[in-house]
Image: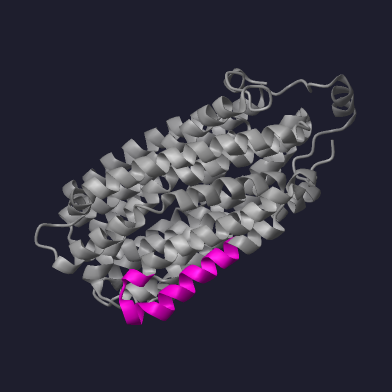
Amino acid sequence: MGVEMKKYNMITDQPGKSLFFFALPMILGNLFQQFYTTVDSIIVGQFVGEDALAAVGASYSLTTVFIMIAIGGGIGASVITSQYLGAGIYRKMKTSVSTALISFLVLSLVLSAVGLLGNRGILTGLNTPENILPDAVLYLEIYFLGLPFLFMYNILSSIFNALGNSRTPLYLLIFSSLLNIVMDLVMVRAFHLGVAGVAIATVLAQGLSAVISFCLLLRLLGTFTQETDPQKAHEADEEKRKLYDFSMLGNMIKVAIPSMLQQSIVSIGMLLVQSVVNGFGSSVLAGYTAGMRIESICIVPMIATGNAVSTFTAQNLGAGKPERVKKGYLAGVKMVAAFAVGICLILTVFHEAIINAFLETGSDASAFATGNDYLTFIAFFFVCIGMKAITDGVLRGAGDVVVFTLANLVNLGIRVSFAFCFAGIIGVEAVWFAVPMGWTTNFVISFIRYLSGKWSRKKLIKV
């Protein structure tokens, strides 16, 4: 194994420590990713205007669905890669990586074409206000032109994590985030490109990071040269490594589809209820956009911890050590509980200052009220998504996808149906009242499956 993986080995080191120090770079990296999308909104809101912020917000729900598809697909691929890594079968591990990269490159090109052709129709179908529709369409057109780079960047990050290297994606995210912010300011302040400038900055920053990431991955894969078991080394010498393996793709798809659903559930929910929020006008949408961006930052440590638990589970099951998974799960519970308390305190105390950062001084009062109401309510419920994320992480890492998929579908159904049914009665608040209801129900269903222990007997790879 490479030097990067030996400091905290998830197969041999103390579970809590190895999980925490593996999850930490993922959390920091994802925070940087959310940080620059938040800065996008602040720059647009402060220097272009309330309508421009609403236009980016209307686009954000749709773009996030596509990126979450990439992240979920990467997690599906990473489970197979992690299990081969845990079993010490490096030749097949490399085949799983190349199979994933080729498959998702093709998928990204297809999704890019779909987005370019359908973005206006989708925005219109979501009742996007007419005064912001042109800017929203322009933002999406630029975004979808660069989607293959954005998509592959997230897939590559998932593969690095599967190989036990969560630091390289962190460094690349810091680089791309800072570059994106600088380019935002140049495009918006110097060249006065408005919404288009923000989209161009995002595509260029992540496109460059994707190219660098691919080069670094090739270098890392070169460090895996000798199988850990003599018999496996002999078998590797006898078997020529494949560039693409359809059977591996089939196993990846089994995990990738529910993983895409799990990763996308928040984004799909936001997209489907976007028409509810849009119906209240662009000022409410601007406030909702600000609150939604903060929520996206707050769920980062929860989702990242769940993804770390997934990799931890996959590697230990590949190594034949299911008892370590339960210890890792308990460590994950403590981590998300601590994060939830800290987030609740910060939002309760500083919610007004946070929302004010997104909106011009002269913005409509309903924009400020919507953002503040959103944050003060949701602040108390992030532990729910934390518990959901780590429980789903165990099931996903084991390849136990049926109940996992059902739980996430129920989550989505609750969020969408409640928002649509009650927004006309209690107002836009129905959109965020539904969020913890979905998270909690998802957790309960997945936790019952976790307690059954059946996930530990799933086999995705042949050792």
The quarter of the picture where the C terminus appears is top right
Task: Give yes or no for residue 425 being in the magenta stretch.
Answer: yes
Q: Nearer the viewer, residue 39 or 340?
A: 340
Q: Nearer the viewer, residue 50 or 18?
A: 18
| Location of residue 74 with respect to 430 vertically, above or below | above
Report x, y in % for residue 277: 33, 72
Residue lying farthest left?
362
Residue 463 in view: yes
Report x, y in % for residue 280: 27, 76
| Quadrant of residue 398 within the rendered picture | top right
Report x, y in % for residue 128: 33, 74
Q: Majority secondary structure of the magenta segment? A: helix
Q: Tell whether 431 sits left or right of 158.
A: left
Q: What span is in magenta? A: 408-430
Q: Tell whether 428 sits left or right of 310.
A: left
Q: Nearer the viewer, residue 254 or 124?
A: 254
